Amino acid sequence: MSDKLEAGLQVIRHHYGKQETLEKCKEELLELAQAIIKNDFENVHEEVADVYNVLSHIKAYYNITDEEIKERQAYKVKRQLKRMKQGR
């Protein structure tokens, strides 16, 4: 992430605070789900960007590193591949 983008996100995060940001995260996730349900794939791009932004705030509030996310992603991919191999 660029320094300029991170600096802007930090200003936004400090302005709105944790609780309002958590509510915004719910809103953005719902908007993404609605765009997918409606097959509005042009809007999906916008909503994915919004979700990325609010997730960066969540990561900061809970001190989650990119490394931790990648480790959990790897675990979940491995687990799902095992399930698929077992026919689930």
Image (cartoon, helix red, strand yellow):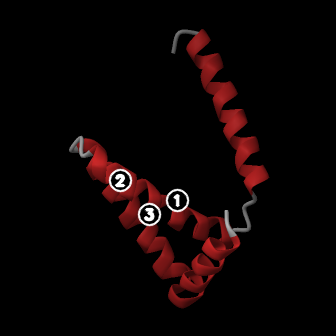
Indicate which disc, 2 or 3, sits on the residue closer to the N terminus: 2
| Image depth: mark 2 or mark 3 in front | 3
Kind of residue sitting beneath label 1: Tyr
Q: Is residue 4 above or below residue 54?
A: below
Q: What is the quadrant of the N terminus in the image?
A: bottom right
* Residue that label 2 marks: 32
Where is residue 47 drawn, in percent x and y? Answer: 38, 57
- Residue 52 is labelled as 1
* Residue that label 3 marks: 50
* Crowding near the residue tagged with mark 1, few <14, some 14–19, many ≥20 C-alpha atoms within 10 Å: some
Indicate which disc, 2 or 1, sits on the residue closer to the N terminus: 2
Kind of residue sitting beneath label 3: Asp
Q: CA distance from mark 1 to mark 3?
A: 5 Å
* Crowding near the residue tagged with mark 2, few <14, some 14–19, many ≥20 C-alpha atoms within 10 Å: many
Look at the numbered discs 1 and 3 and tell me whether their residues touch, using CB distance below 8 Å. Answer: yes
Residue displayed at 64% across by 30% down: 77
Where is residue 61 drawn, in percent x and y? Answer: 66, 73
Q: Is residue 79 above or below residue 73?
A: above
Residue displayed at 52% across by 66% down: 53
- The total number of labels drawn is 3
Look at the numbered discs 2 and 3 and tell me whether their residues touch, using CB distance below 8 Å. Answer: yes
Where is residue 44 drawn, in percent x and y? Answer: 34, 50
Residue displayed at 60% across by 65% down: 56
Image position of 76 (left or right of 44): right
